[in-house]
């Protein structure tokens, strides 16, 4: 469970044939939040917790080399991320 705009929302891991995916739940609402995880949307009920959740999800995706699967993004719906500056960047969009 991670804070986000919906209390009690969850993230989840998928694994198949040595590949990992990370379902980010409600932790991100816009692709800009990958690049600027400290930016909240108007839907974030717990501002500080939402920022911490996004950073945690993005850091976990980088560490595990997992495909990130955000629930609220339009295409691309799946991608890897890497650390860049004080945020992250989309790489290898699927």
Image: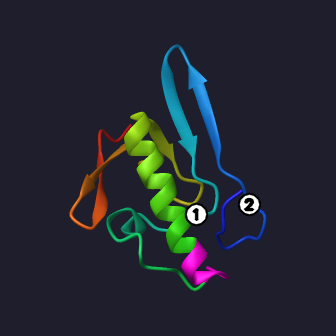
Q: Quick check: can you spot residue 54?
A: yes
Q: Residue at x 50, y 63 (%)?
A: 54
Q: Which residue is mark 1?
A: 27
Residue 9 numbered mark, or none: 2
The image quarter containing residue 2 is bottom right
Q: Quick check: can you spot residue 79?
A: no
Q: Residue at x 74, y 60 (%)?
A: 9
The image quarter containing residue 62 is top left
The image position of residue 51, as x and y in percent, is 50, 72
Range shown magenta: 43-49
Q: Is residue 85 magenta?
A: no
Answer left or right for 80 relative to 57.
Answer: left
Q: Residue at x 58, y 52 (%)?
A: 24
Of residues 56 and 35, the one nearer the viewer is 56
Q: Residues within 10 Å of mark 2 (few under 14, many from 20)?
A: some
Asked whether the residues under the numbered discs 1 and 2 touch, taking CB atoms below 8 Å apart as contact, a structural biologist would say yes
SS type, badge 2? loop
């Amino acid at each position: 469970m991670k804070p986000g705009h919906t209390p009690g929302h969850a993230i989840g891991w998928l694994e198949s044939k040595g590949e990992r995916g990370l379902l980010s739940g409600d932790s991100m609402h816009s692709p800009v939040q990958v690049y600027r995880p400290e930016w909240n949307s108007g839907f974030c009920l717990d501002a500080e917790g939402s920022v911490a959740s996004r950073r945690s999800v993005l850091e976990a995706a980088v560490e595990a080399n997992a495909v990130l699967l955000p629930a609220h993004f339009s295409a691309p719906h799946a991608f890897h991320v890497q650390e860049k500056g004080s945020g992250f960047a989309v790489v290898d969009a699927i």
